[in-house]
Image (tube, grey):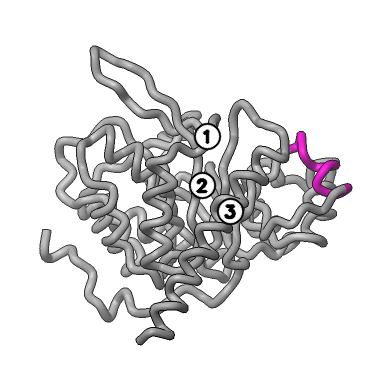
Amino acid sequence: MDQMAPTAQSLASPIPSSPLPNRAGIGLKAQHYQEILDTQPNIGWLEVHSENYMCTGGPTLKWLTALRERYPVSLHGVGMSLGSAGPLDQAHIKRLVDLDRRIEPGWVSEHLSWSIADGVYLNDLIALPYTAESLDVFSAHVREMQDALNRQVLIENPSSYLRYEHSVISEPEFLLNVVSQSGCGVLLDVNNVYVSAHNHGFDPVAYLDQIPAHLIGEIHMAGHSQTVIDGRTIRIDDHGSPICGEVWALYEHLIKRTGPKPTLIEWDTNIPALDVLLGEAAKADAIMTLCGQRETHRACIG
């Protein structure tokens, strides 16, 4: 839909500079609290699911507060349901605002999805129909979230397994229109792009190349699994295994274009030893360093 395309001017404002270091971070898991505090590994930052720390006290918040003294932190939400047709949960917003004020994270992020309908909470992040109506609803909710927090947030592209027949806007175009209408930034999940591209038959490189570098505040990398349904292989974004070679290749392609970006290693099921996460983070740091060196070399030659 040509009339939906954001203009260059509407996408001109870059994200704030360096709210997180341009290095790899890892998702913080309870199994690793003490080990990280004791060993203080050389990682760029930590990310947590906001909903796990929306409390006024207790051990989990105590751990996070202690780790925040040593590392930058990003808050990643899974429960705001910005795509729901109804109003946002004001109690949920208040809990997030309180956590934001306490932790002072580098970024606060949410998903291009919905998970609540008529007060019923679904244990999943469900893709939206990409229509003008859902675009207006989603963008208005992003603006409401940002107004409450008094800060820009990042919106993450989803993984998907089915498509709505009445979607009339491509996902990258929809995401860029959300940016245009709300002023948010993008959390670009490379694994989600790969999973959806495989499931729906589109080119993941073309998707990545549609997202302007200056809008990307954070990148996510994760593993996925495969299952066969009715004779067809479906990739599932389960964050329970090492990142595959194809996703690493997409990440390198992206970093060559964008330069280094804060990059999270997500691992939410079958949690491995901390050293495994640190090894994946080291791979991302090495790619960012190598691509940065190549860009410097080209600039010197030029």
Task: Give the image quarter of residue 161.
Answer: top left
Q: Earlier in the sequence, mark 2 or mark 3?
A: 2
Give the foreground label among 2 and 1: 1
Answer whether residue 129 is visible to the viewer in this image: yes
Q: Earlier in the sequence, mark 2 or mark 1?
A: 2
Image quarter of the C terminus: bottom left
Disc 2, disc 3: CB below 8 Å? Answer: yes
The answer to if 50 sits in the magenta stretch is no
Residue drawn at (46%, 44%), measured in percent from left and top? 81
Dominant SS of magenta comes to helix
Q: Residues within 10 Å of mark 3 (few under 14, many from 20)?
A: some
Q: Which residues are magenta?
A: 30-38
Q: Which of 112/17 is in front?
A: 17
Image quarter of the N terminus: bottom left
Element type where label 1 sits in the image = loop
Instruction: Give the left or right position of residue 64, taking residue 80 as reference.
Output: right
